[in-house]
Amino acid sequence: MEESTSKEKMLKSIRNALIHKSEPPVVVGNPEKKIYVPITETLDIAFAEEFTKVNGNFVYCEDIPTLIDNLKAIFLENNWSAVFTADPQLEKVLKAAEIPCSTSPNDFLKTKVGVTFCESLVARVGAIVISSKQTAGRKLNIYPETHVVVAMASQIVPDIQVALKVLREKYANQYPSLVSIITGPSVSFGIENLKVTGATGTRNLFVFLVDDSPENQ
């Protein structure tokens, strides 16, 4: 009888709860409140640390001549061939580094190494922001097994929100149809949940960062 009474009490409590519903508590957030831990390093160092954590290869360059020397050395070290770029400025840099490259769309499918600029670099997560508005378009960032990005130190921003704000200000009413955030080489998981790098995209990801700060000019 006691068990029956206890059960009836419990069912009665449930019925009362269903009849007299209370409004869920509303937590009003503060959109201005900072939710991230402050970045204590300079943005270039913070980016380099986070980028290398996700298996990116980071190369610091004091200036354009150093960029040319570093490109030449790393391309020779890796014996890279079938290099493609869609940007005339990068074509000049590659030629200065004595690196044969193509800009012809007819050679794109043979490409092993793609060289591009970027929209910005995100220090907090070590990510590269690219868009369809760049001369490289949509394909050059994902098709080659090696993606080389040339960026300026002034392009580093602290967070993704700032990177998107920069894009909005840059393109205004002609916003890119595609914005991608690249965090390290392509990674997928195969049979038995084994991690596979580069199976469905870029295998090697390099960022050559040129210091364009005023004190370095």
Image: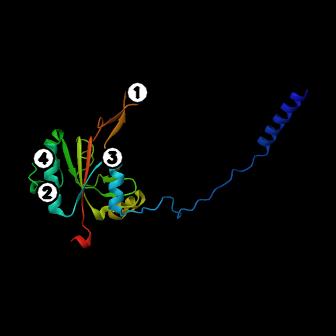
- Asked which quadrant contains residue 117, the reply is bottom left
Give me the C-alpha separation between circle 2 and circle 4.
11 Å
Which residue is under mark 4? 76
SS of the residue under disc 3: loop
Q: Which mark is residue 107?
A: none
Callout 2: 10 Å neighbours few (<14), some, many (20+)? some
Left or right of 103, for residue 60: right
Q: Position of residue 93 (x, y in %)?
A: 14, 57
The numbered mark, 1 or 2, whose residue comes first in the sequence reads 2
Say whether disc 3 or disc 4 marks the residue closer to the N-terminus: 4
Residue under numbered circle 2: 69
Q: What is the CA distance from the residue labelled 2 to the residue labelled 3?
A: 24 Å
Q: Amino acid at mark 1?
A: Glu
- What residue would you read off at disc 3? 184
In the rendered view, would you say 7 is above or below 154?
above
Q: Amino acid at mark 4?
A: Leu
- CA separation in Å, label 3 and label 1: 22 Å
- What amino acid type is highlighted by mark number 3? Gly
Disc 3 vs disc 4: Cβ atoms closer than 8 Å? no
